[in-house]
Image (cartoon, grey):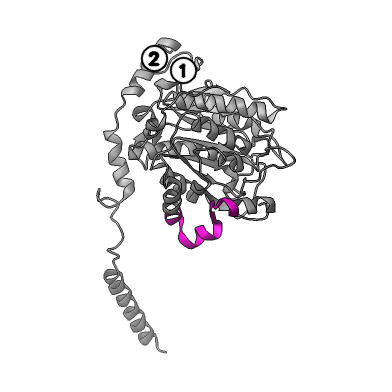
């Protein structure tokens, strides 16, 4: 080929390239500078609509309680003694640095109350979940109450407190269960929504029992887990493999309203399976999630859990998430949900409103860089954020129609 011919071919190729570039403008792609185009831009605009009233009041309170900062400090909102949210590495670790309510008779003044259940007496393999509440609270100092994508600020749009921990009895399951039920019933009966930080999953029975004792209404359960947790006993006790056998024996908790999502792998004990079949629970495996997608699974789960019920409780076992992302748990099982799938599911379930929720099986001794505790934290705040976004936080109050009798 001559030099002239080669040059001509290159010229034609360049011309075609230029023409293709003009003809292949992808108009279906959103324009990020058009405020109506992307969710990201809409979220940026929405921030201006959120008030700062409570943040401003907290700043003033911090200066009053912590004394004004040194004269050399330009930012006059900084006190001498750390108070409130900042700095994230300082202060007393309540959940999200929410107010600590020492007198638990005052929890009814808050929309939601966090309570820790430091108990791992129901563990059948790796213990350590008694340190779960501490781990979750510690990493919660990392977060602010504002979520960019949702355009909400929990500090401004709801009230949250931390009631500390239930006094559990390490060597006694049944006494601990009674303590847990009393604590949860006290919070629920006040009108505040209980948020429980576990703890192993054996607490799933006494937490539901506590709420069920405050109402004549029916309660459904959405249980996210890799394990069935519906044996009657394990190792001759009501261990963390048994809560939903006993919870669905309660008169206002029907097993047909128990939805179990993520079940599967090599850790579902065969003694649990006949109970699932006999009680006709609703079971979705990871294969179901792959086939139908998170949105459809959430839709079906809500339909079954709410059928004939007046409220729904969510129990989230952190081991439902792919083990690579949550090493700090007692029974890790590969093949679970990805973090984004888990958060999507939680947001969809919580959008309809919850009467309470728990996150369980966080075991900090096995964790790395707090990533399991962080995931548990995110489960809780995403549930709260979804309820705030959809106006369903507080929906549970209507079911509280009788005083609880302490056990």
- Look at the image and give the residue range highlighted in magenta: 277-297
Residue 265: x %, y % from top left:
64, 55
- Report how many numbered discs are placed on residues in the image: 2
Task: Assess whether residue 292 is covered by the magenta stretch.
Answer: yes
Whether residue 347 sits left or right of residue 244 in the image: it is left
Question: What's the residue at 49%, 40% (across, down)?
Answer: 314
Image quadrant assignment for residue 331: top right
Task: Assess whether residue 308 is covered by the magenta stretch.
Answer: no
Question: What's the residue at 30%, 32% (across, down)?
Answer: 50
The image quadrant where one finds the C terminus is top right
- Secondary element at image label 2: helix
Residue 344: x %, y % from top left:
44, 48
Indicate which disc, 1 or 2, sits on the residue closer to the N terminus. Answer: 2
The image quadrant where one finds the N terminus is bottom left
For the stretch drawn in magenta, the main secondary structure is: helix
Residue 140: x %, y % from top left:
51, 31
**In this figure, which residue is indicated by the disc labeled 2?**
61
- Secondary element at image label 1: loop
Instruction: Report how far apart the C-alphas of labels 1 and 2 lie in the structure.
Output: 9 Å
Callout 1–callout 2 Cβ contact below 8 Å: yes
Residue 54: x %, y % from top left:
34, 23
Crowd band around label 1 with a 10 angstrom C-alpha radius: few (<14), some (14–19), many (20+): many
Q: Can residue 168 be seen? A: yes
**In this figure, which residue is indicated by the disc labeled 1?**
83
Q: In front here: 176 or 350?
A: 176
């Amino acid at each position: 080929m001559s030099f002239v011919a080669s040059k001509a071919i290159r010229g034609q190729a360049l011309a075609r390239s230029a023409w293709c570039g003009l003809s292949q403008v992808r108009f279906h792609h959103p324009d990020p500078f058009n405020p109506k185009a992307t969710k990201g831009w809409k979220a940026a605009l929405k921030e201006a609509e959120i008030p700062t009233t409570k943040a401003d009041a907290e700043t003033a309170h911090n200066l009053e309680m912590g004394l004004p900062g040194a004269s050399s400090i330009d930012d006059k909102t900084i006190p001498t003694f750390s108070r409130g949210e900042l700095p994230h590495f300082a202060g007393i670790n309540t959940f999200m640095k929410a107010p600590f309510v020492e007198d638990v008779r005052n929890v009814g003044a808050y929309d939601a109350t966090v309570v820790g259940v430091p108990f791992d007496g129901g563990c059948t393999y790796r213990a350590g979940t008694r340190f779960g509440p501490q781990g979750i609270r510690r990493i919660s100092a990392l977060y602010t109450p504002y979520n960019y994508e949702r355009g909400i600020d929990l500090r401004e749009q709801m009230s949250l407190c931390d009631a500390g921990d239930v006094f559990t009895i390490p060597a006694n399951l049944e006494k601990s269960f009674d303590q847990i039920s009393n604590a949860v019933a006290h919070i629920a009966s006040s009108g505040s929504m209980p948020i429980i930080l576990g703890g192993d999953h054996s607490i799933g029975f006494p937490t539901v029992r506590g709420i069920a004792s405050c109402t004549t209404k029916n309660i459904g359960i959405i249980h996210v887990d890799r394990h069935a947790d519906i044996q009657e006993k394990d190792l001759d006790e009501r261990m963390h493999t048994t809560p939903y056998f006993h919870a669905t024996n309660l008169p206002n908790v029907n097993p047909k309203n128990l939805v179990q999502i993520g079940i599967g792998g090599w850790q579902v004990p065969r003694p649990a399976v006949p109970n699932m079949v006999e009680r006709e629970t609703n079971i979705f495996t990871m294969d179901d999630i792959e086939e139908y997608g998170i949105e459809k699974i959430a839709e079906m789960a809500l339909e079954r859990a709410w059928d004939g019920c007046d409220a729904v409780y969510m129990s989230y076992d952190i081991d439902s998430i792919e083990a690579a992302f949550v090493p700090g748990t007692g029974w890790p099982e590969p093949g679970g949900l990805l973090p984004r799938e888990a958060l999507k599911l939680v947001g969809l379930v919580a959008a309809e409103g919850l009467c309470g929720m728990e996150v369980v099986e966080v075991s900090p001794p096995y964790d790395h860089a707090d990533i399991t505790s962080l995931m548990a934290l995110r489960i809780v705040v995403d549930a709260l954020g979804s309820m705030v976004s959809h106006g369903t936080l507080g929906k549970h109050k209507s079911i509280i129609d009788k005083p609880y009798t302490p056990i």
